[in-house]
Amino acid sequence: MPNQSNNAYALTTLCPILPGVPDDLPPEISHMNGQTHSACIRYLLQDVFRVSVNSPMAKVPNTYLSRFYILQDVPYQGHPAILEHLKSEYLVFSSNFHGDLEPYLEGMWANVKPEIQALLPHCWGSENVRDSASFIAYIRKCQIETTFFFVGSTDEPLDVQLKSLYLKQEFSKFVFENQGKSKEEIQRAFAEFERRTQPVNTDAPTWVAGAYSLDTVVKGAGE
Amino acid sequence: MIPQSALELQDIQGNIVKAYGRYGFPRARYVFYRVDDARKGRKFVENVAPLVTTSVPWSGAGVDIPDVAVNIAFTYEGLWHLDVPEETLHGFPDEFSMGMKARRDILGDIGPNHYTRWDPIWTDKAHPFRQHVHILIGINGKEEDQLEAMYQRICCILGESDGVELLTGHRGPGGAEDLAYQPAIAADSDKEHFGYSDGISSPYFEGCGESPRYILGGGKPTGQDPTKPEGWAPLAAGEFILGQPDESGAYSEAPGPPLFARNGTYMVYRKLHQNVGTFNALLAEEGRKYSGGPEEFAAKLSGRWRNGAPLPLYPTGAEADKFASELVAAEAKARSASATKQDKDEFERLRLKLTAYDYTDDNDGAKCPFGAHTRRMNPRSALEFGVKGAFDSPGALSNRRRILRRGLPYGHVSDPTRDDGDHGVVMMILNADLSRQFEFVQQQWTNYGNDFRLGNDQDPLLGNHGINVNGRGTGRMLIEGDGKTRVPYFCGGMPTLVETRGGDYFFIPSMTCLRMIAMGVVDPT
């Protein structure tokens, strides 16, 4: 199945964006009054959702990588190509994740419902999206086949991968801290390392989804 | 007789082909100017031009080595202030017109390297971000009085041009903030302030007119025996000189008319402060933990022992010391009045050991770590990672990243336990493409490690290692084990050892271009 490669799923969704200007806007984007639906979506994506450096999609379980963007039109290649246009602008939502589509979208509804409810009113046919089931139905309607895709990840569930990343970082720290010590000291330190890091417990301690680094590193002061 | 050369050496400024240090010029002064009146600025350039040293070889009959060498270069703003036409200026690549401050994110000039910490000369108080240094004149020489005489001569020329200002504001010893020029001197033979022998190898390119022996280790690797001339081929002149074909067979990006850029090049001037106290403390601390001790640790950071012996050929301190003392003895013998041909050949044989090598026998990094400074800066054929024929040529990933290094240490270390004080290196880097060569090396090979399979580890000596929330350095280096008795050593928490204290990007024009700038006849149409 072209949308799947082993346990990795590549979702591609094109949601048609409403033409024209919205009638009324929620308070957080009220200053976009008079701007198009498309401009409102872009503002939400570029500013409102960017509450920190991390995307709200980090909250959705099993997300490897996801991306939202606006497809405005097809580019014109110049004479003698024929000038063509799309019927509307589209909100493109793509996501690479672990597992099947429905549980993933359920997780999305459960964790980023406010963001979905802010975006979708600017898209065609979204007025029936009220709950998880209707959200899944809407996404299925907008889904297109991904065909080729590259899985930049192992085939494990995200929590296993995050735990692996965490352990790799922690183990590297362990090596720096304990090299040169006696066998007994290293064994003792390693037992403590195992107790602290709990290698088989994928819930905790672990790498936080969406985080760039395990430590808070200040890369230089200055500007 | 002047050797035949494909290059017009009489039109190319001398600092491009000559590392003046090799000609017994251990001293330099770097003097900077700002031009406020274009006409007077051009007059100044016109009067300085006859003093400028060219690349004509100093070897051979009828060619005397001068007392001093003078060279001149311009920033983008400088050329603008000398009325070089807009259309010509627009032909310069973006990185040159932006200047070094604006390229700080690429260069790692953040944190302790940020321009707010640079010597005052680099900051125009009203516009701290702008380039206000316009002209650089470098004077290299043997003796201080000869430098002084030339400096005074140029000051006299300046006296006649009141639209040009000599910029003060170099930091110096004893808290000085306002020196009129940047002095530099290789006081202790060829050692820089961390105690390493420096300036050992330099790229060798077609038509450079330098002795052919420098091709060993200086050219590009051919895949044959690195200890023999056939192991190396000269790099294309266009890697270092504009208007000449480069390694891809093309000309580097340069402004028109063609005559303007031809035989010129770009130069990076960087004043680099050395944290000598931190370096010595690092050697002492890590040297206690690292099985090879502090001196071997120092060698692993650099890729060479501090006496210059390269790690791939001399993996142990005993071998390196033996080599170094043999080299010193052989040099004394070869330079004595009674020297025989055998004496000279023996010195030559030993001297070549400093450069005529590659990493073919060290593909696991057991002798010279992958992250060592010299292996990063000039990987030779090492980016093949032991796969012969991995690319079209063994240097495919490094031949276009070579840079000419021209520069000298400055200042004096009075207290080796302290970082403050005035000591470091004035680095000058010459290349035909700032972005492809210098900036790539700085961004990818100095402040990153992926090309060497080292993740984001940085050059241990030059990297801007950053600090964590506790103020501790975050640099890391892996010293590979030998797979037998020596286990790998992981050095963490490394502090930043070298900090930028000023600099900018300069254009070194050809002699023809220099005269055209002075006359105001540059015509891009």
Image (tube, rainbow, N blue to C red):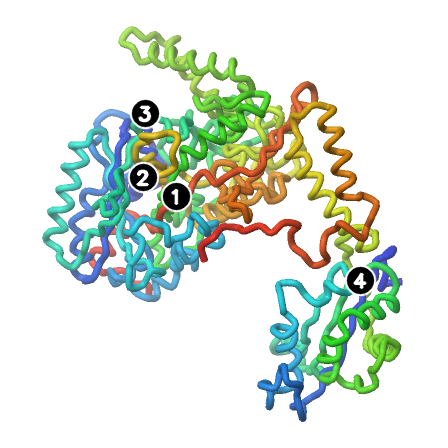
Examine the rendered structure and indicate whether residue B322 appears above or below residue A137: above
Q: Secondary structure at mark 4?
A: loop
- C-alpha gap between disc 2 and disc 3: 22 Å
Residue pointed to by mark 1 = B430
- C-alpha gap between disc 4 and disc 1: 52 Å
Residue pointed to by mark 4 = A61
Q: Chain of mark 4?
A: A
Amino acid type indicated by mark 4: Pro
Tag in front: 3 or 1: 3
Residue pointed to by mark 3 = B188
The residue at 77%/34% (across/down) is A191
Residue A73 image offset from top left, x and y in percent: 67, 79
- C-alpha gap between disc 3 and disc 1: 25 Å
Q: Residues within 10 Å of mark 4 (few under 14, many from 20)?
A: many
Q: Earlier in the sequence, mark 2 or mark 3?
A: 2
Q: Secondary structure at mark 1?
A: strand
Q: Secondary structure at mark 3?
A: loop
Compare residues B231 and A5 and report the one nearer the observer. Answer: A5
Q: Earlier in the sequence, mark 3 or mark 1?
A: 3
Labels 3, 1: one chain: yes
Q: Secondary structure at mark 2?
A: helix
Residue pointed to by mark 2 = B15
Amino acid type indicated by mark 1: Leu
Amino acid type indicated by mark 3: Asp
Q: Residues within 10 Å of mark 3 (few under 14, many from 20)?
A: few
Labels 3, 4: one chain: no
